[in-house]
Amino acid sequence: MKITKKVISAVWLVLVLAFIYVPILLLAVYSFTDATMVGGPVGGFSFQNYLTLFKNEDLRGMIGGTILLAVGAALISAVLGTIGAIGSFYSKRTAKHLINYANQIPVVNADVVTGFSLCVLLIVLLGIGKDTFVPLVIGHVVLCTPFVYLSVMPRLRQMDNNLYEAALDLGATPAQALFKVVIPQLLPGIFSGFMLAITLSLDDYFITTYTKPATFDTISTYVVNATKGGQTEIKTALWALSTIIFLIVVIVVVLMNVASRKKKTTEERI
């Protein structure tokens, strides 16, 4: 009976992993062919999609703009989310609950609602021009900041509550206690929130659509427009871009896990 349960569990795990990763691997395989559509005829092995990706000026500009937007929004979100988490953690009970509840709303709210609301507020009511990047950056910060908050808060709860007070008792100013004692304890959570913010910004479509300048595209909006336009060469080059993004994510996750295990092993030895 136990063997049967183990077999069923193993089969179920394999099916779930296959459901998640097989489509991505299939797309990666087709990115190295001359096929014009997934499932279509394959003439042979080719690097043409990758050559197009790096030679096409529009694609390079789109990728560069998307990365700059993601990193910039993630940096701002990391600062705001960390400040919010620290402020909430050291607040009184009522204020803490209010901040936590307020942070949960953007997380569960639909992106299309957030995007349309920001468009109405920033562009229509406040008159901030849609030909600027201000609404777009604000929109991505609004999207990402709550997730940084959620990444930092567990580290605060794991931290010894007496560290901050002890630093003050030893003569540190509140600023010194914050930056030399509290912030170093939170760095893993801040970094996790920063990476999550980059991923969310790269992936967002609805908020970007409502707030971006007309002449600017991110990866998500560019992919939708290229797919609708039927540009075969561009569409297949985006297979190569998807493969590269997936590989980068895998490498980052592996490196983070290796670093975490090394740190845990070092701490256990000490």
Image (cartoon, rainbow, N blue to C red):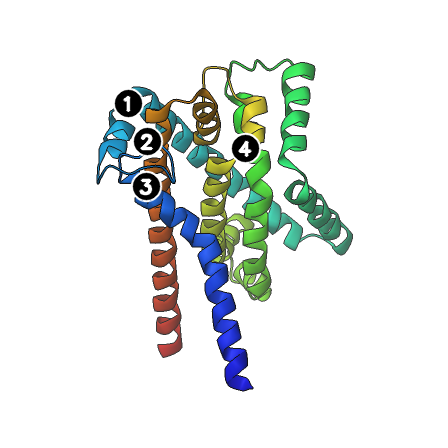
Residue 180 place in picture, x, y as percent: 46, 54
Residue 144 place in picture, x, y as percent: 55, 40
> Earlier along the polypeptide chain: callout 4 or callout 2?
4
Q: CA distance from mark 3 to mark 1?
A: 20 Å
In the picture, the disc for residue 56 is 1
The reply to whether discs 1 and 4 touch (Cβ–Cβ < 8 Å) is no
Neighbourhood count class around disc 1 (C-alpha, 10 Å): few under 14, some 14–19, many 20 upward: few
The image shows residue 109, relative to residue 149, as above or below, that is above
- Figure quadrant of the C terminus: bottom left
Amino acid carrying label 3: it is: Tyr
> Earlier along the polypeptide chain: callout 4 or callout 3?
3
Q: CA distance from mark 2 to mark 3?
A: 10 Å
The reply to whether discs 2 and 1 touch (Cβ–Cβ < 8 Å) is yes
The image shows residue 218, relative to residue 254, as above or below, that is above
Q: Secondary structure at mark 3?
A: helix
Is residue 55 among what the camera can see?
Answer: yes
Residue 157 sits in which quadrant?
bottom right
Residue denoted by label 4 = 140
> Earlier along the polypeptide chain: callout 2 or callout 3?
3
Residue denoted by label 2 = 237
Residue denoted by label 3 = 30
